[in-house]
Image (cartoon, helix red, strand yellow):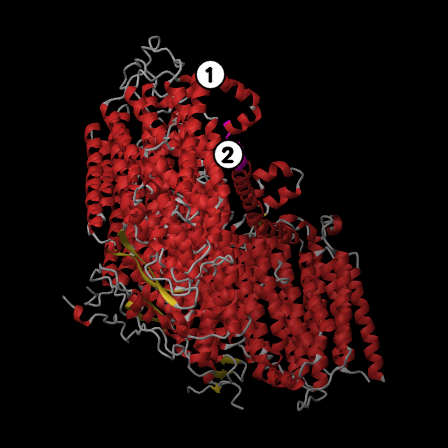
Amino acid sequence: MDLIWLIPLLPGLGALVNGLVGVRAFGKRTAGLVANAAMAAALALALYAFWQLLSLPADAREHTVRLAAWIPPIPLALGNGAIGGFTVPWGFRLDPLSGLMILVVTLVGFLIHVYSTGYMHGETRGAYARFFAYLNLFAFFMLVLVLGDNFLVMFVGWEGVGLCSYLLIGYYYEKQSASDAGKKAFIVNRIGDWGFIVGIFMVYGTFGTLDFRAVADAAGPMGVEAAGFGTLSIITLLLFIGATGKSAQIPLYVWLPDAMEGPTPVSALIHAATMVTAGVYMVGRNAVLFSHAPMTMEVVAVVGVATAFMAATIGLAQHDIKRVLAYSTVSQLGFMFIAMGVGAFAAGAFHLMTHAFFKALLFLCSGSVIHAMAGEQDMRRMGGLKPHLPITYATMLVGTLAIAGIPPLSGFFSKDEILYRAFLDHKVIWGVAVATALMTAFYMYRLMSLTFFGAYRGPAWEAHGGRADHGHAASGGGHGHGGGGWRGPHESPRSMTVPLQLLAVGAVLAGFVGVPAALGGGNAIEHFLEPSFVARTAAPPGATAPATHEARGLGEAAHAAESKGGEGTGHAAHLSRSAELGLMALSVLAGIVGIAAAYRIFVRAPEIAETLARRWSGAHRVLSNKYYVDELYGATVVAGTMGAARGLWAFDRSVVDGAVNGSGWLTVSSAWVSHALDKYIVDGLVNLVGAVLEAGSFVVRRVQTGLVQNYALVMLFGVFAFVSVYLFVR
Amino acid sequence: MAEAAAFYILAALILGFGVLVVTAKSAVHSVLFLVADFLCVAALYVTLQAEFLAVIQVMVYAGGIVVLYLFVVMLVNLKRPPDAQRDPRRLGRLGAVLAVAVMVELAAILAVGWSRPEGEAGALGPSNVAQVGRALYTDYLIPFELASILLLVAMIGAILLARREM
Amino acid sequence: MPAWFSLNDLYYLLPELVLASGVLVLLVATALTPKRRQGWLSWLALGALAASAAAVLAVARPVPVDVARGLISVDAFAAFFKGIVLLAAALTVLLSVRYLDTEGARHGSYMFLVLCATLGMMFMASGTDLVVIFVGLETMAIAFYILAGLLKPDRRSNEAAVKYFLLGAFSLGILLYGISILYGMSGTTNLRALAEAVAARGRDPWLMLALILVAAGIGFKIAAVPFHMWAPDVYEGAPTPITAFLSVGSKAASFAMLLRIFLEGLPSLSGDWTILFYVLAVVTMTVGNIAALTQSNTKRMLAYSSIAHAGYLLIGVIAGTTRGVAAMLIYFVIYAFMQMGAFAVVVLLRRADVIGDELKDLGGLLARQPFAAVAMLVFMLSLGGIPPTAGFMGKFWLFSAAIDANYVWLAVIGVLNSAVSLYYYLRVVVFMFMKHEAAGSQPALSPALTTALVVTLAGTLVLGVYPRPLFELAELSARALGVVGVSATVF
Amino acid sequence: MSNAANFPILSTILFTPIAGAVLLLFVNKRQENLIRWIANLVALLGFLVSVPIWFWYDPAGPQYQFIERVPWIPSIGADYFLGVDGFSVLLVLLTTLMGAIAVLSSWTAITDRVKEYYVFLLLLQGGMIGAFVALDFLLFFLFWEVMLVPMYFLIGIWGSDRRLYSAIKFFLYTLVGSVVMLLGILALYFHLHDVTGAYSFDITKFQAMHAPFDLQWWVFLAFFLGFSIKVPMFPFHTWLPDAHTDAPTAGSVILAAVLLKMGTYGFIRFSLPILPEATKASIWWVAGLAIIGIIYGALVALAQKDWKRLVAYSSVSHMGMVMLGLIALNPVGITGSIIQQLNHGISTGALFLIVGIVYERRHTREIAEYGGLSKVMPVFAAIFMVMMLSSLGLPTLNGFIGEILILQGAYTANIWWAAVAASGLVLGAAYLLWLYQRTMFGRLENPKNEHLRDLSLREIVTFAPLVVLAVWIGIYPAPFINRTAPTVQAVMQRVNPEYARASAAAGARQAPKIADCDENEPLTPFTTAPCGDAAEGQAPPPPAAPEGGGAPQANPAGGRH
Amino acid sequence: MITATHYLLLSVGLFSLGVIGVLTRRNIIIILMSIELMLNAVNINLVAFSHELQNVVGQAFAVFVIVIAAAEAAVGLGIILAFYRNKETVNIDEMNLLRW
């Protein structure tokens, strides 16, 4: 386990090799091989490390490796006036939570790498290596993110994955929309990072350390800020702002749908399975802090549920296959935050894991579809693909059922756990979440229907036999056929279908690690993860509130003993087994209803969709325009910033500079104000002084008339002035 | 009383001729009034028991300098009247006003009164030519000699400037 | 009281006597040399100046010596200024050699006048009696009136002479009127006796009047605003080497006189004249710099720059401390080098076909005459006070004197002014380094001019990097001011 | 390792470029390639001779090391007094490195008046080094002013468009500040004389002096004007975009990388330790201006259509960050400020080089003229990407380290400073990414860009050290941070003595856990620095310059030679 | 009783007349003469003080002033002649080649 730092480093090396050498020298085969080998090695190491972790006793499953001092200690005062030392090590920590995450990242990552070798084969040689370099780099940063033992190392990964996301979204950089989307992703993430980083400063100021474990241990004995809005609440709120950016929650979710401009494997890996869950992971990582700040928890839950619902509604009306999935991702991330917000950290992490499998699967399937359709992403031009793409269809169906929460697929267990915990916490949240689950099932099956069922609506392929210029430049789908003409929808190569099948297996089986007690399972994953969510220091006796709260948040079994003192909530956290089963049934029902409705509308009677869209045209328009949020942001935040920028620039050129140039000053006073604002005002305050001096110079020169008697006059005036001053002043 | 009468008469003459010098239309007239003025000043010196200076005044000023002026005036006045052109930017009138203002100020300050510096009650006889001579040749020998060089410079300079060739 | 005159007096007057002899020899030699072959007279003049300088060194004494019944003080202060004046004169001679040939003027009479002016300046620096100072001043002034108008065919030269003369005579009237009142207040013209008498009188209104009038008269000589009006016109019109001499020698001697009269003669009124000079200094440097900003004629620009420098130099007077005086002395040496050097470049540009005093005549000088261009760059930077040139060290001393004497705002105005001044100094640089080459024949260096440039450049650079000897000398000299000397005893 | 032989290393560093400039004067100006070779070799040599101080400087020793002291003008107490502490070591190295890079980058960019160009460039180099190594106030000021002249010429002769205007603006603007600063120096100088009875320009004496508050206040204002114009801080920044825009590439690089550091160097070396009370009284408005600068600079950068001007305004923003860390007056903030100065030198220098590359090829800086360059210049695009990321503070690159330390320091001083200033990071990402998108991404639509050459080997070599440094500082900044410790410690002793007192304990408490420890890099520098004596008022920082000017032997056992 | 003050007031008057002349007349020669008036005013002062103080210095000084007045007159007239040769006038308003 001392070698865990190698897990991120291997893909890092892969990225280095491919980035420095590969883009110039490697053939596609070599480049793909390097990247895949790096990922495979990382996967192997991760499996080994995880196995070692499991072999430890449950309360000792934590291992920290520190490579070096990143920032050596520098004295700094803390919030309480004491002087501490600000220092950050390059430290990595393996514990159950990070163990789970590295497994997900390396496993899903590896599969997507494999998939990409097939999907990206149409790229030119350099671009191919570049893609894999980025992908490896992403894996590197993602692993740093999850393995980091302190806030700053996590932040390294945090920003790093943002960068890779930027690079990969903008992979087709010649496409304006792609580079726009990349930029948007990065900047919106940066807005979130603002909160994260300020939160980090507060963490240091409060605890004097940035180490997760030390922070958690220090926060453990602190009181829960149930009554007011204390330091921990502010910290957690700031951290959560960071999470909303990375995990695409309201109000910072807008970048994720646009991020679908990237190649589909990227969408699968980054924007579905791993990176976007970083926010969830971060909240889970700081579970102790969050659980001490109930007000933040409320915010988290509300934001989560609102995002889940809103994204699901938008998903109903999208036509782009990837966009549907993107909104679905946003929605599912909302679910995870609901879990976090209601204190079900383990459930959230569980859903994170299952989601990684089925959403990656769904994305890769959509990639397969797009591949088959030569880059077409609009579902209105698909349909009836089932016979052409049997494997894709089957695996995608598995994914759809999983996300819809149909037992015994993985999505069922994790989603159900969240719904259950939400029900315990707040009925309204639960209600909305169930509605969302229904919609999820609906729009996912709508996607299935539009893609695989019905009549084929796409272009005729025989007529396009000679079409050579399709491919990424035209469609953005990132797919090319090595120069050959498109010969109609067809199943993808093995390098793509095998990962699909493996992921489908995962999507089916991943849920079984968390079979709830109500179904006779042991909820193994929750027990496994739980040490990551608690402070090691025991709560001081009498501090009932935190204990109670943790009990609520962390599962009753673990803290049953501690929650003895706590009454009310502690007991309310239990439902009878039958009630639990009833809830379970309800959620399954929601899934089935959704699927059935979608089947009815889109497969059986497609005209209903038209009718509905016409009848609810207003709502439909709002939904298909994504609630106009992008437009709103464009009109307010972006326009405001750019307006300020332009205004300040004008200010800079005219006033600040102008006081010292003068030409600006003169121009302002002239009638040409409108034109001048743009052009001359800029050269305006600095130059004013210059102009004044120059004007002064001319005045002084005019006095020099060349007439001797005037000179004598000036001299006499000097005498006169001095004498007068003497006479009248002194 | 006689002293006072002499002073007032001479003062009136000096100032009167001074006004004429400054206001005379013709430069020749100016020069002539200047001679008269200088002679009056010389007379004033006599009343102040500065006979030597009075003589010098008559000899150098009235005899030398004024002749020079007259000569130059004659030389340059032949062609056209000098006051023909007038530059509007010249502030002559303001100059006169300012000069009067300065005069008033000076007079105001000087009229406040003057007192003899202490411990300097020297003895200057009624005929002090010898004393002046001694002062010039002992105390002020160095400036006296320097003045000779100055006069040499002036002489050579005047020649340099006045002759036609370079 | 010692004998009215003795060999001792003659010994201590050796520098002046040597120079006066040089003047007479030169006069005779001029008379005997045909017009076309007068070139060697310049070297004769240079020899006389060198001999005089040697004599200055020879008679220099650590303790001030009173000579000629207290009319003259042979002290380090005087020696320092004599050194500056002689240096300026020597450089003027070097600048003049080819200039005179180009203009077709005679060397002999020109050099005679230069030496006479120098003689007058030396008396101004060493005189401790108003009469000596005044006669020395006039000797210098009259020589300059003539020198300014020496290029008779040149109407600008004529005009400069007339203006300088009329205004000079006018200001002389004012100065003398002031001096006459001073005499009336004290019964003496000796500065030390004057100081005692004035101290006894206190702030008498007459004294104040005299003070203002004398300040106005001297203000004219040092070209302080508002008594500066003559300077730009005369500097532009006069022959360039004379302009240089006027701006350095005349100014140095006038400042020496100013220090003598005010620090030695009127120290008890320092409260009053400090304010007066404060105002003069501020106005002078500001107006000088502002007016210089838009000039297109190099000489005229340098004239305004010289006016501004008078303002800076007044800071030393205002501070009134030993440090202040030392700063002035230091600055004058430095100023002599850089100002003479700048004029040397202007002289260089005077060719048979080009007058060369417009800024555009400097165009592309770097390509045409790199040495001169680089030298001019150094002079301009030095005038602007940029290290590592000497000008920085000079300004540093002046401003430090002001700060030391608690005239912080004066120093602030001074430094801001010096920043403004860089604008027009750099304009010169722009023309030399960044503009196209000007028309006209190739400016060529003559041996004399090269010597002058090398000397001024070396002075400007060396004093900027290693000013130590100058500083020590200047402090020594400044301390001598106002010290009553011992009587002369050599023989 | 140490400077066992008391080799006058600082003088060597200082005079190498100056000697090179003098040497160039004697080369025929038509032999342009010879001139280029000489200049490059001299610049490289200048860097190589400066490398030993990185190794020889002992963070555990006295603050100032490699002391050289020779009387210069004894009558006023000015000495030729050189010495460096960790901060100046870093800046000197930055200067020599950037100097070499600037010279190298000019090979093909400058074809006109080559000889003068290199002479000025090398003189500039000498001036900058001098300012960083001088421990005599007068000497410092001398070098400080000397720099203006060659820079003026670099902009004025080899600049573009409005070069004369920009050059004179640069010159006068900075001159105004520095002359006022000179008055401040003089006021302190006379106060030192009043206190000690001796005239001296010894900076270490000033740093031990306690001036009355009134004097401190005025002098602080004077210094502030001088330094903040150089930095430049918000209302005094307008010379910067013009100067940068019109300067030749090497000029911009030097200007951004080194010249601006003069201002912040001045604050840390002079304003803070000499005028602690006045500094503390000014924290609020200085921080306010710094924060305004961060946001204002970023916003104005966002509005630029001119590539170079955009980078110039980003400089304003970044330097605001540097100032913020500095005025936080705690060790983390100041350390961050110092590190960020290096970072800014590296990243912004590189960004100017990047503009220079395309400007040399296309002779326009209009962003709209470019687009899609990634296609034709992939290596260039990659380097640009790295430097852009470094500039916007991506972790694992250098900018992040500085910004995180600065913001943490600012947070400790005042929560709102950090909160507001951190928004600069967002804006920074916005303008840089947008710039990158507009120039590198998109389709190559301008036919003039179709045949742009990618980087030549020489150009890659100019960037290589910068990229290496960016990554090094980003991943392992400890050697840099440790070297700043004596400086920070000395400053703290003046402005915030609690830190000086508590640092030993803090270091001991926080130090463990960290496994790695390079032998040359003690991880707890604050423990070793002398501090915490009760009478810290009287005790001057310990630079102990023995008579005769030998460097104090920090490591007696280290004499291997 | 005629005191020094009387003489001073006289000299102020004469001095001011000279000043007015300098400032108002256009003929350079008359300006020169006005300056002579100013110098005479100075001399009246000196002699009056000399008499009042019974001190010879004033008279000696006055001698020097006269000498210098003479020298100035000579040089001044020479300069005017040189000017006149070029310009054919002694009008001071026509002398404005050097300005600004």
Question: Residue shown at 66%/48% (left/top)?
Answer: E88
Q: Which mark is residue A630?
A: 2
Compared to A493, does A588 lie above or below? below
Q: Nearer the viewer, residue A468 or D97?
A: A468
Q: Does any portion of residue C268 appear in the rendered image?
A: yes
Which span of residues is magenta-colored?
A624-633
x and y, in percent, of residue A524 in the image:
29, 45
Query: Where on the picture, by quarter, is residue A671?
Result: top right
User: Looking at the figure, which quarter contains the C terminus of chain C?
Assistant: bottom left
Q: Nearer the viewer, residue D208 or B26?
A: D208
Q: Does any portion of residue D156 appear in the rendered image?
A: no
Disc 2/disc 1 C-alpha distance (Å)? 33 Å
Pointer 1: what residue? A605
Q: Secondary structure at mark 2?
A: helix
x and y, in percent, of residue C475 in the image:
44, 76
Query: Where on the picture, by quarter, is residue C266?
Result: bottom right
In the drawing, does residue D278 fall left or right of residue A534?
Answer: right
Amino acid type for the residue under numbered disc 1: Ala
x and y, in percent, of residue A411 in the image:
35, 35
